[in-house]
Image (cartoon, grey):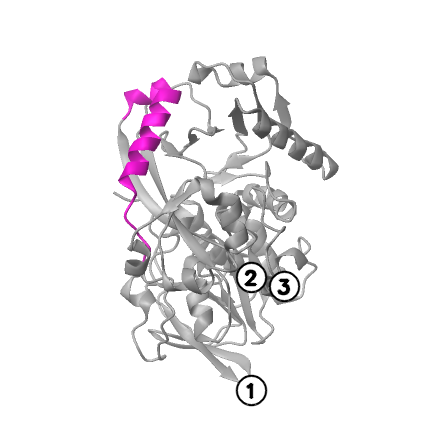
Amino acid sequence: MSAPLIHIESSPSLPQEADVVVIGGGVVGVFTAYYLARRGVKVALLEKGRVAAEQSSRNWGWCRQQNRDARELPIATKSLDLWERVAQETGEDTGFRRCGLLYLSNDENELTCWAKWRDFAKTVGVTTHMLSTNEASERGKATGRKWKGGVSSPTDGTADPSKAVPVVARAMMTAGGTVHQHCAARGIELRAGWVNGVVTEMGTIRTNTVVMAGGAWASSFCNQLGIRFPQASVRQSILAVAPGAAGLPDALHTAVVSLTRRSSGGYTLAISGRARVDPTPQQFRFAREFVPMFARRWRSLAPGAFEGMRQGHESLAKWALDETTPMELNRTLNPRPDMRQIRLTHKRACELLPELRRVAISNVWAGYIDSTPDGVPAIGEVGAIPGFILAAGFSGHGFGIGPGAGHLMADIITGTAPIVDPRPYRPERLKTGAWGKVAEF
């Protein structure tokens, strides 16, 4: 079993040239291509497998401002508006709803942290409500428990990972762009140090601008170009249950387990932050940069297995442009779920929400969440290679802020006033240490 995902057809042929080539058919790459196409830019989107088949269909589906790091909050707020607008622009249904998110807790320290974030959110015009014991217990009545407190973020929402990104890719094609699935980008050709083309397994596309939005594959691709992009990923395991459970919140977070209602009427279940660290050559290479991140998150992480080695996305190997690449050998990162984690998640969910005992598990999957050392994405041109623009390292937040990130990329490429200040995301910041800079949430 794996994460549900709708299928879209590819464009009939590879173009010989394009204004912009976007590498990676996940949420960030697709929204980048979508906003470029709507501006009349000739854009080609390359995806080694299927659009959204990796983390863009394997996430919770949350589109939130609540508990965002201050650097990400502006782009999260813009993204909510863009999620709403894309349905109006395209007539496509991404499953986006401002259903609100509910956080419940019996931990005073956690509640204090949320209250502190609420005070900060007020200063930037974001609405969030702290819940009293009675309010939290009433909102969480499906648990049958009394809660010390909680948070309600009424303007936040969810979209459907099984269809959101594919339907936006389809809308991008309608706007004039092209999508090429099962077409891996093998490398970049340069002319006088500038981007001059993208070599794919199906041929070369002449272009002066390339966007690398390859998710967990981005660092190994950058390595081919002599670009040092510190990135590491963790494996998170998730399950979904069939429709039939009644009276549950649309989106609920607790320290025990979190759940999200899907368009099908079923629910996705996960334990927030819990993941396996699978050792890879890339993780060893960037171990020093990730010490601050590990120091903050170590309680949620556990040693993994050699799954990461098997997948090949964090290899340090070099390849020639006429050779089969690791991306062609493994077109979709589909790691084995941690079944111990799956059983624990299901057990906790059924204990917390007895209504879930009435429905069966429908899907089980795992995915690799790629991160930067500070937990904030890298968005911007890489100075060493003019025309090569990076959009990766979204640290588990890419689905929610994907529309804003894509819009920002289109702004940067077309020289338009940026939708948000791009400076917090510039890739150059990763050349310095992350101590004191790791995202709190």
Q: Nearer the viewer, residue 353 or 207?
A: 353
Q: Mostly what secondary structure, the magenta segment?
A: helix
Label 3, residues with CA under 10 Å away: few <14, some 14-19, many ≥20: some
Q: Vertically, is 440 above or below 283?
A: above
Magenta span: 332-359
Q: Is residue 294 visible?
A: yes
Q: Which residue is mark 1?
A: 192
The image quadrant that residue 341 belongs to is top left
Inspect the image, locate mark 1, and give the three-letter code of the amino acid beneath it: Ala
Name the residue rendered at 67%, 59% in the picture.
423
Q: Is residue 113 magenta?
A: no
Q: Nearer the viewer, residue 407 or 379?
A: 379
The image quadrant that residue 370 belongs to is bottom left
Residues under labels 2 and 3: Cα distance?
A: 10 Å
Q: Which residue is mark 2?
A: 36
Label 1–label 2 contact, CB within 8 A = no
Q: Which residue is mark 3?
A: 412
